[in-house]
Structure formats: C-alpha cells, structure tokens
Image (cartoon, rainbow, N blue to C red):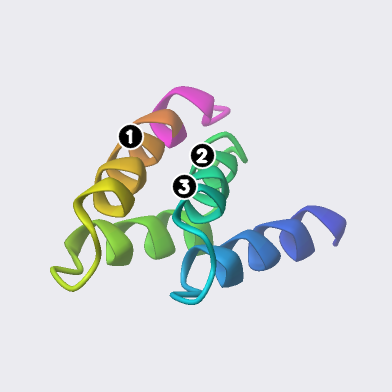
Amino acid sequence: MVKEDIVNALIKVLHDVGEYEAVRIAAADGLGYSGFSVSARTALLRTAEDKGESQQIRASAIRALGHTVHTTKP
C-alpha cells in the first residue's frame, strides 16, 4: 500500500538523528496529517516521550499527535 510506504518513510526521517531538525519536524507534521495510522501514532508518541530528543522535536511530535486526532476518519 502506497500510503503505508509514505508513513514508513516519514517515520524513518523522524527517527534519523543525523537529519536536519527542520526536516525531522516536517516529517512529524506529515505523520500528523497522514490520518489514523497506528505506526505513525506510535512513532510520534515514542518521539514525544524520548527525553534524549530536543525540545523542538518533542514539541513537533506532540503537535502532530494532536493533528492525528483531528484527521482520523470515523
């Protein structure tokens, strides 16, 4: 499925500590607007709870988690 491939690519970028922070934040945003995906929500939650991450990355993951609530289709 194409959508799951995109979600997996965004998760990989989000977790890539060698990537620019702005790119990782954009990946988190993309995951937030991807609709309900268990793997996207799990990755965002993991990132939000990771105290080793920067505050900006953690905050972007938290914001993106909020978007997943609003983009979920019943």
Residue linked to disc 2: 29
The first of marks 3 and 1 along the sequence is 3
**Residue positioned most to the left:** 51
> In this picture, is 34 found above or below 44?
above
Q: Position of residue 50 (x, y in %)?
A: 20, 69
> Where are the magenta residues, as a range?
68-74
Between 59 and 21, the residue placed more toward the observer is 21
Tell me if mark 1 has few (under 14), some (14-19) or many (20+) residues whose alpha carbon lies within 10 angstroms of its own.
some
Tell me if mark 2 has few (under 14), some (14-19) or many (20+) residues whose alpha carbon lies within 10 angstroms of its own.
many
Between 10 and 16, the residue placed more toward the observer is 16
Measured Cα–Cα span from mark 2 to mark 3: 6 Å
Measured Cα–Cα span from mark 2 to mark 1: 8 Å
- Inspect the magenta stretch and tell me whether residue 73 lies in it: yes
Tell me which amino acid carries mark 2: Asp
Element assignment for label 2: helix
Q: Is the C-beta separation of discs 2 and 3 under 8 Å?
A: yes
Residue linked to disc 1: 63
Q: Is the C-beta separation of discs 2 and 1 under 8 Å?
A: yes
Residue at screen point 50% across, 63% down: 14
Residue linked to disc 3: 25
